[in-house]
Amino acid sequence: MTPSLAVRQEVTLTPDPRRVIVKLFVPGEDAAVVRTRARALIDRVAHLDEEETGRLLRDTFDRFGTRHRDLAGTFHHHYDLVRHRAARARDLSPTSRLLVGAYFSHEYAVEAAALCNPSMVAHPDQTDLGTGQLRVAVSLRQIGEGHVSSIGFATAVLGPGRQLTVADRAGPLTVGQRSGVRHRRDLLVAGLAEEDCDNEVTATVLDALPERYDEATFERVLGNLPPDLLSRSTGLGTLEQLRRTNAGSYATAFPADTALHQRVLWPATPAESSGMEDSRFVRFVDESGPVYRATYTAYDGRSIATRALVSHDLRRFEMTPMRGPGARNKGLALFPRTVGGRHLALCRADGETIGLTVLDGENRWRAPTPLHAPSDSWELIQVGNCGSPIETDAGWLVLTHGVGPMRRYAIGALLLDLHRPERVVARLPGALLSPDENDRDGYVPNVVYSCGAVIHDGELWLPYGASDTRVGFATVPVGALLAALVESRATRDRDG
């Protein structure tokens, strides 16, 4: 361990139970024996007189109106979702319909259980800053009731020096709205190949689809399939698989007048239904300019899948599946630019080794090249990355995590060759940051973990989750860290 390098900051982010969203609530559907009580509830609301209905609705808005954005719109939406259960929906007054929507709504505290596993990137807004300052966007894993994870954000200003100011996170949250997305044919091809779904139906559909298509085009192609294909024994099952694979891509957009910290990326597909975990954001730059990219883990309660998102402004996000052997398991982290014309990522496809994977021409991440396996005592269980590689003059700086005795997580570092990242140049002898007495207790004890850091003004700014409970920040002088790295044994043997 190298305790003198990392300096912990006093600023911390702790879970705030006041940060709530409104979700649909259907009484009875979560019971052991599923028997929705929706119809009976709507009937009871319908039998209230207009005066009582108005009083209840006013009271609800008085209690909750300032905590949420467009609460009336949410109530209208929830009413629309359950109105098919109303015996006389057309007879309900506008006030009664809003009240029905209120009864079918509940607050959910997105980070009531924990706040952890941050990543940090330069913010799209760099206005009104002083000398030596950088505004950053911090992504956060928020965990609420039922251990459901979502992606939240905070805004902070780094500098001058080691000063850190985190902006207030107050105000109503919003989960955004689903918006149209231009699907990619190559992603559909890769997804079907991964599911080993290849027959006359899929071949016909893929042949008819353009490289980019919208939902209407997709459904039109399915609707034009010849009856003799659909009548085959595999026809309907293949249609279901096509729709399920295609639905993995979607977009979410937020109103322009919402602040970054008010935006919540909430699970929106069956594959994400139990959580969106550990987003690793990076500011990717190529000839077309900068764009924000990230990977995250989708969890449905039984299985995990690696997914990607892209955003130009952190206001509209497009989510897509990631395919191929390199995208298996958790913890894939993208490089911030292409290297030698290749799109690269760090991964841990085998569950315990850091590897390097390359995106091929069919949009699949290839089988990885191993970079670093568990070797030191503090990381013998498994190793992985702590976010995207950071470019320095000396090479690609990779923050790692290792798991030791008592499932204790610590953070280390590697250096990869700038032009040949499959070559490990050097590594830190020991851990850079380990749980201290202030970090070790929490929702998941004995853990420090990060999903991405930045370099600003000669300092590595490292946000980290402390025992899956709160977020801390540490700084490390980049020059001192690079000087503390020792030449990799493999490099020494190869070059010696």
Image (tube, rainbow, N blue to C red):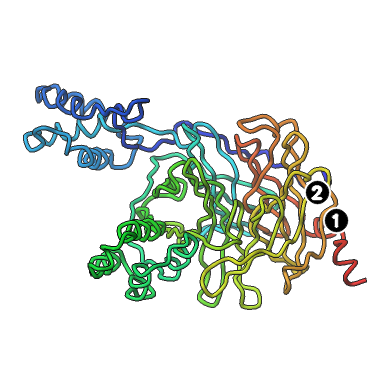
- Residue at 80% x, 48% y: name it: 5
Contact (CB < 8 A) between labels 1 and 2?
yes
Instruction: Pick whichever, 9 or 397, lies toward us.
Output: 397
**Residue 152 in view (yes/no):** no
Callout 2 amino acid: Leu
> To which residue does mark 1 refer?
484
Instruction: Say above or below: 390 vs 254.
Output: below
* Residue 196 percent location from the top left of the image: 47, 62
**Image-based side of 305 in relation to 52, left or right:** right
Label 1 vs 2, first from the N-terminus: 2
- When asked about the image quadrant of residue 286, the answer is bottom right
* Residue 39 percent location from the top left of the image: 18, 29
Callout 1 amino acid: Ala
**Image-based side of 91 in relation to 34, left or right:** left
**Image-based side of 132 in relation to 98, left or right:** right
> To which residue does mark 2 refer?
5
- Residue at 69% x, 66% y: name it: 391
* Residue 261 percent location from the top left of the image: 47, 46
